[in-house]
Amino acid sequence: MPFFGNILPALRSYSGLEYGIDGKVTICAQPFALGMNVPLTLGRRLEASGSSAVGHAFGAGRGGEISGKPVRAAQYVRMSTEHQKYSTENQAEAMQQYAARRGIEIVRTYADAGKSGLSLDGRDALKQLIEDVQNRTADFTIILVYDISRWGRFQDADESAYYEYICKRAGISVQYCAEQFENDGSPVSTIVKGVKRAMAGEYSRELSVKVFTGQCRLIELGYRQGGPPGYGLRRRLVDQAGVTKGELSRGEHKSIQTDRVVLTPGPREEVDTVRWMYRSFVKQGKPEREIANTLNERGIMTDLGRPWTRGAVHQVLINEKYIGNNVWNRGSFKLKKKRVRNSPEMWIRAEGAFDPIVDQSLFEAAQKITPIVSVQNMYNLTMRAAEPLLDKVTDEGIGFIPWFPLAAGPLAAPDGPLQRIAADHHATPSQLALAWLLKRSPVMLPIPGTSKVAHLEENVAAAQIELSDQEYETLSKAGSASG
């Protein structure tokens, strides 16, 4: 076969077979497909279609002269906290080998290091890549990705396909370098790609279950699962035999997988302060805010080096770790979905796991003092003066009951944003106003007044409406502008 310089590697990247017949090369979209004889003569024009193998090599939908120039590509790499085989360096090396065999030149790298693939959130490099593609500023015609899972472990396989389609629509193909299917757009590769996308998402779901089960077991054994120890306590590192290895300072983490962390009483002055807080609250009847003010007047800071607040004092007075109990799973944020507060029966606990610094009877007495469970204030889509209060009770898990929750003012006009978004959800503006409130905070407790069963059913149905982040932001901005 005659030697054609850099042309043959470029064409080979998109062909399944090649044959030398009278100075011609047969290009196949996939193995065993009928080929197309293309005389390779420098300077000859080669017309390419978007679905053909040659079309990918020379730019979909374009014709061009055979010049021997390599195809320009960008590579996208991502690593979360998974196995080392997915390190960005290993991905880049595999893609470099893939590109070299096919005459592809990698001209740009987009890297998301330490980022989860469950969603687009936080993946600035992939966002920038898609933005470059949509803005037509990309100086490449191919995007190389190690495999389907590096593009993302999206819980909705269609979301993964959507981002790839954005690139395809702009004439840029996404090629997976370590997958066993051909990147040729054939029915077989399309089917396999869809299955692999679903498998990538399912892997995360299965891993989440396994990790959760393992964490529950460690909690029951008395080991700490992340988070700061809290004022008056410290984290002690122990090996698998329970032998103490040292105390972990703030920001330090264990480096050996089999090591474990337990809580231990902190400095004497901090322990005494915690006990004083309980006595002041239970025996002297001082409210939490007064206790916080006294601590600040004495120049005592929290474990995070901040002034005390009512909420910070409250957390000390309700946390069972001060009587030695290990409690976990109060809240969940699985698979990067909506954060939820779990009911007490779902909590995982181990009693007597740590040395207590507060007497059991004093702790129980503190719990019997009725806490604030909810607050009320004027709040709706257009009247949001109570934002600081809502943020505060959200942080503390206190219910918030908004007055006039359905009020929407001019936003409910026929040409207003509330009406437009409501139409997209086949809902009423009032239902959208309620859906916005429910998305605003997990402690929101709207109680719209009604005297008709039909209206009650309509209000209840609003809880099933899921606003997208973009819809939520659109309504939030519109409400602020009209309020």
Image (cartoon, rainbow, N blue to C red):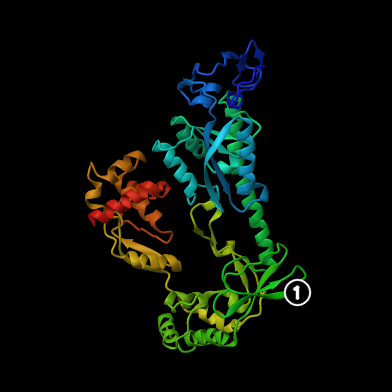
Residue at x-position 70% and y-position 62%: 257
The kind of residue tagged 1 is Val
**Front in this rendered view, residue 42 or 100:** 42
Residue 182, horizontal then vertical, whole percent: 62, 28
Whether residue 120 is visible here, answered yes or no, is no
Residue 184, horizontal then vertical, whole percent: 57, 26
Label tally = 1
- Residue 417's image quarter? top left
Q: Is residue 167 above or below residue 393?
A: above
Q: Is residue 233 above or below residue 181?
A: below
Which quarter shows the N terminus?
Answer: top right
**SS class of the residue under badge 1?**
loop
Whether residue 7 is visible here, answered yes or no, is yes
* Left or right of residue 453, residue 345 in this image: right
Residue at x-position 78% and y-position 70%: 241
**Front in this rendered view, residue 466 or 201:** 201
Which quarter shows the C terminus?
Answer: bottom left
Q: Is residue 74 above or below residue 7?
A: below
* Left or right of residue 122, residue 416 in this image: left
Q: Residue furthest right?
A: 241
Q: Which residue is mark 1?
A: 243
**Front in this rendered view, residue 378 or 203:** 203
